[in-house]
Image (cartoon, helix red, strand yellow):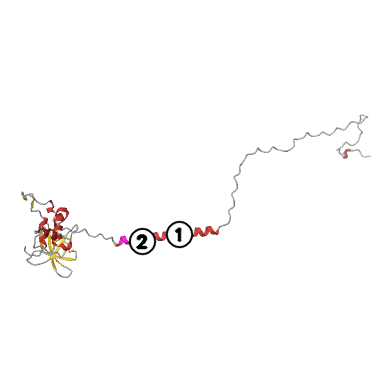
Amino acid sequence: MADVASPLQFGDPPRLGPYVVQARLHTAPAGFVYLAQGPDGRAVSLALLTRGAAFDPAARDRFVTAIKEAAPEQGGVRGWFARGGRARSAVLEDAPPVLGADTGRAPWVAVPYVPGGPGAERFLEPVMVGGTLIGQAHGPDFVPYWLTDRAPALAPPVRRRPLTETRKRVLLATLALLLLLLLATIFLLLMLLGRSGDAPMPQQLPPTQFMPTPPPTPTSPEPQEPTRSPSPSPPESGQETPGRSPGGDSSGDPQL
């Protein structure tokens, strides 16, 4: 492989773990190889799967298995397989040592960068299936279905809540606290006012039953018939005595 670095392109990660990605070194069907710098300033070769290969569980598992077998101290099983006398490793025997790796949903591996020597591209070789149990695959259509998705597989960004949402929550919490204080104040006032008015309340009178009574009868006496005065009886001689009649005028009397 020719160690010809090319500038980063759109979609390339600026950082993977503690390593700062600086340039592209190699592009393979299963992933990308970058030139990166470690936290101690050391140059490293870093391999990252494509998004299509990372979404395929079988391809991702082959890549992760190769990383674990090359790094027994990180939980690999290379030494256990080597007990039979022949290492059944997914990578070649001259695989470079692993400096750092991530075996999650978007796995990557970092190895020391040696100009002209093997780099992290060795871990991308077992991802591509080159044969079957009965021999080499035949036919032009034997290609993985995920080769069309050539974007780098990156871990989803950590969703951080914006500051405005935090301010809204603080404001809502403050309003709720003020409302609770107001309710507590009203409750205390009601308790104090209730204690000050401990005078016995007048008992409620029993309900009255109203029975309608008949209208009163008039008590005025009945009108009496007027009494007639007796008429004067005539004298016994039968003639009236000449003289003044009662109520007569005295001017007509003859003078004596």
Quadrant the C terminus occupies: top right
Which SS class for mark 1?
helix
Which residue occupies the foreground of this view, 197 or 63? 63
Q: Quadrant of residue 232?
A: top right
Query: Dot 1 surroundings within 10 Å: few (below 14), some, or many (20 or more)?
Result: few
Which residue occupies the foreground of this view, 181 or 222? 181
Q: Amino acid at mark 1?
A: Ala
| Above or below, 70 relative to 247 | below
Q: Earlier in the sequence, mark 1 or mark 2?
A: 2
Residue visible at 33% across and 62% down in the picture: 167
Instruction: Examine the rendering and report whether any part of residue 164 can be seen.
Output: yes
- Say which of marks 1 and 2 sits in front: 1
Which residue occupies the foreground of this view, 130 or 39? 130
Counting from the top left corner in percent of width and height, residue 136 is at 5, 51
Residue visible at 17% across and 66% down in the picture: 19
| Above or below, 42 relative to 212 | below
Residue 148 left/right relative to 208: left
On the image, numbered disc 1 is attached to which residue? 184
Span shown in magenta: 164-170
